[in-house]
Each structure stands twice: as structure tokens, then as C-alpha cells.
Image (cartoon, rainbow, N blue to C red):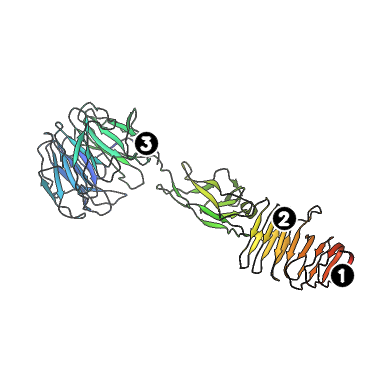
Amino acid sequence: MTDPIFSSPVSNPYGLNVVGDFSSPSFVDIDNDGDLDLFVGTNFGFTFYYKNIGDAVTPNFVIQASNFGIIEVGFSASPTFADIDNDGDQDAFVGEFNGNIRFFRNNGTSSAPSFASETGSFGLSFIGSFVNPAFADIDGDGDLDAFVGERYGATQFFRNTGTASSPAFVSESGNFGIADAGSFSKPAFVDIDGDGDLDAFVGERYGDTLFFRNTGTVTAAAFVKEAGNFGISDVGFSASPTFADIDNDGDIDVLVGNSVGEQQLFENTIKNRPSLVVPSGIIYTDTKFDDIFSTFSGTLLASDADGDVLTYGIVGGIDLGNGAVKLSNTFGTLTVNKSTGAYTFAANDKAIESLNAGANADFTITVSDGLLLANQTITLNITQSGVTETNGNDVLTGTAGNDSFDGLAGNDTINGLGGADTMRGGLGNDNYIVDNIGDKVIETSALVAELDKVTSSVTYTLTANVENLSLSGLNAINGTGNTLNNVIIGNSAANTLNGGAGADSMTGGLGMTPISSKTSAIM
């Protein structure tokens, strides 16, 4: 949400009328039917109840004969509502000209209220005449605090030192920066700029509504008076503002009572910024094995209170011309459907496998309603599980199962241990330990300057791009070369060594070793 822009006022909208001078309106869903009803205090101490017989989008206020027991308070009734005892229904407080704040406890229910006047008001002490109470959890501790305006323009703060269900108000000397309004101050609190903390508006004698932006936080308010108030114009005399989303369009409107009993509605005409929810993160774990990083997919969730058509994007992304946009970085490619928000992240396997430490990368996702833009960040989070393969010189050791490794570049030593393992190497002089006839060695680099080696305890034939073979153990096993110039060394048993094509060098060891090669050097 951004700062509002209020339209020119409409007098007594939605069926409202003048019921008395110095009107003081207050919105509340008193019958729990999902729309806002209205109570209006007047100069002669009465509080009138307007039931909303319309709905949350198109209200229709009709004055009722009963107000559920909120009795006349003398002069200058200023009602406000709060669930002060945390029992799930709305209670009423009414300020009046003698400086008393009358408390009416709701002994009914959230849908069928029944107000009864009580003698105490939880410590809201006398501060002057013509008092106007307002409630807000200004310190973010979960209970309601109170602010009270009065005849000479001050706004007195009462901190709730009790609890949400058993309040105890204590007057404090400061009020977080709400300056004197001159006279007849009437405070109201609302998060008008959508930043998560409560801002303050204060009506005053000459019809203006002053705005105090909260530049602090939810728990430590700091109000600063600003010159403007987003278009809430002078209403004549005795401005009494109350805030609510009266038409359920997702923004805050304001209704201001005045000295002649009118209710002036200022509708918020600003378009609402769309909201966007993204996944908490894209998470991959890199291990020492040849990992499979599956494509991450889902659908972004966005909404717009104005009902506008939304378009998704990626900051820095490339429009593919097919209804999608993408952005690539070192670790993969994020693709987002511009109309549906469906997305995929395809990982760059090699880049992730080559990491020797965890890594993060951010993608900024946007959603636009054609005018306003919202954005959220998706974080790619890559973690490391132990020592993993890199483009350096790695020593990778497997388990008793069927493991898969990719040593990448570097002079790697890969030992799958038990199981039928797949061992892959790249640039560099790699060493492979074979101990199972199902083991596979895949050497991807064909550079002639490299010397790769297999040490095998089972009969083995060299695969492509591997130059050397050494037989290990005590068993009579055989070794066969490939088309390269191989060096093949037997073990202490009777081996059969076959160099295959190429200029091979073969050493038989201690056993009886038949040797076969087109071109062989026998040692």
C-alpha cells in the first residue's frame, strides 16, 4: 500500500443523515455480519446507531431505534469501540464534555451486543473537558493503549500496564510526538501508509484533520507532523475523523464528522499496489556424489484489491517473446510465465557441483497492475554436505552402495568402495579405484598430456581416454588396455595382460603372466 489520495468529500453518503450537531462517528461491525455499522455521538450526549443493511462493498446505513444500551452521557458524546476485555465482542467507551470517559461493557455477544454502563474505566483519569478517546496497541505488546483528546488540543497517552483482558491504564507525560492540535483534539489511529505501524490523525476545532506519520516502529512509535493530510479538506468546524475500508476495495477511507452534524466521506482513490507471495527459497544440497538437481517449479501467488490484470516479471530478465521471461545466473535459469506466475528453476549442474562452499543468489520477482509494482526476492540457497567435488584436486570416497561421482576438473582420486559405482573425471590426471565388475569409469578429457589411471582389484578393461591400469590384490585377474599407449601393471598373481592397440608397456609382477599386445614392452 502507498500513501492515499482522498477524493473531494461527499456529505452524508450511504443513507446517513444529520441527527445532531457536533457529530462524532465511529465504525464497527457490531453485529458480526461482515460489514461495517456506524455509531454517531452528538452534542446532546446521545449516541445513534446506524445498521448497515447493505454489504461490505455497498453499505446502506439505516438508523435504528435502539443502540444496545449506550445511554445518554450529558453533552458531547464521542464514542469508540474496542474489545477491551478480550472476550471476542466489542465494548464501548464514550467521552463527554465533563471529561469523563464512560465505559459500556458488552455483556451480549459479538453478533447480539448488550451494553451495560460500569463505574470505572480502567484508570482513564480526568485530563480536561470534551474528551475524545481512541485505542491502539501503540507499543506492540498485544494489549490496547489509549489516547485521549481534549478541549485545549492536547492528546494524552495512557499506557496499558495490564493485559489484553484486564487493562490498567496509566497516564504518561509523553505521547510519542503528537503535537498540540490547538483545541478540541480528536485522535484516530490507522496504518495509512501500509508500512506495518500505526499513524495518527487528529481532528481539531477549526475543521482540519492533522496528520502525524509514525517514523518509528510497531513497538517504538515516533510521530512526526506533516504538512499535508492526503486531501482531507477542512470540514468547517470540529473535525472528528474515523477510518475504515468502507467499500471493501482494499484501501482505507475516512469519514469526518463536523459541527453541523454532517458526515463527510473522503474516499481513498489511490490504486492499491498488488501483493506478491513467493516461495521461501530454492534449496539444493551439493554432496560428494554426482548429484541430480531437479527442476524446481511452482506458481507465484499475487492479488490485487482493485481487480486489475497482473503481469509477472523478473528484474533484469529477458522477455522470451512467448509469454515468459527468464533470467540466468551461474547456478541456473529462472523462467516465469508473465500471465500465470508459473515458474521453473533449472539448475546448472556443473556449476553447483564445482562449489567447495555454500552459495546464495537472489532473483527479484515483480508483479504489476499496469501502474503500481510490487516485488519480492526468491533466494537460491546451495548448501554443502561435507567435502564435495570441485574443479580442484579432490579425493572422493563412496559407500557400500551403488554410488555415482563426477570429479570434474583437477587431479582427482575417486574410490567408489563397494557397489557398482560410476566414476566420472574431466580435465586433469585422475585416479580411479575399481573393486566391482559393475564399476564404470568415464574419463571425459582426451588431452594427450594427461595421464589417467585405474587401479583395479577385479578383471578390468580400460575405457576411453584412460592411459594406465594397475591390478591390485592377490587374485588372478586380468587387465586389458584400449587404443591408447597404455601402461599396464599386474599384481602378484597369475594375470593375463592385453595391451590392445597402441604402444603399450606391461609389467607382469610375480605370477605367470601371459602378455598380448600388438606393440608391447615387457618388464
Q: Are marks 2 and 3 in contact (CB under 8 Å)?
A: no
Give x and y (percent) for residue 266: 31, 38
Q: Residues within 10 Å of mark 2 (few under 14, many from 20)?
A: many
Q: Residue at x 65, y 65 (%)?
A: 417
Which amino acid is tagged 1?
Ser
Which of the numbered marks, if any, corresponds to residue 160?
none
Which numbered mark, 2 or 3, is in the foreground of this view?
2
Camera-side residue: 33 or 161? 161
Residue highlighted by disc 1:
516
Mark found first going from the N terminus, 2 or 3: 3
The residue under label 3 is 5
Query: Label 3's element?
Result: loop
**Residue 464, horizontal then vertical, whole percent:** 78, 62
Q: Give 518 or 363, whichever is nearer the viewer.
A: 518
Judge from the rendering whether residue 95 lies leftward or rightward of residue 284; answer left or right.
left
Quarter holding residue 78: top left
Q: Is residue 257 above or below residue 71?
A: above
In the structure shown, which secondary structural element does the residue marked by tag 2 occupy? loop
**Which is in the foreground here, disc 2 or disc 1?**
1
| Element at label 1 | strand
Depth check, front residue: 471 or 443: 471
Disc 3 marks a residue whose amino acid type is: Ile
- Residue 435's x, y, as percent? 69, 68
Residue 79, x across and y down, in percent: 18, 41
Which quadrant is home to the C terminus?
Answer: bottom right
Q: Which residue, as the protein is rendered here, is positioned at the far top?
A: 182
Q: Earlier in the sequence, mark 2 or mark 1?
A: 2
What's the CA distance linking mark 2 and mark 1? Answer: 30 Å
Q: Say which amino acid is labelled 2.
A: Gly
The residue wearing badge 2 is 426
Please tell me whether mark 3 or mark 1 is closer to you in this view: 1
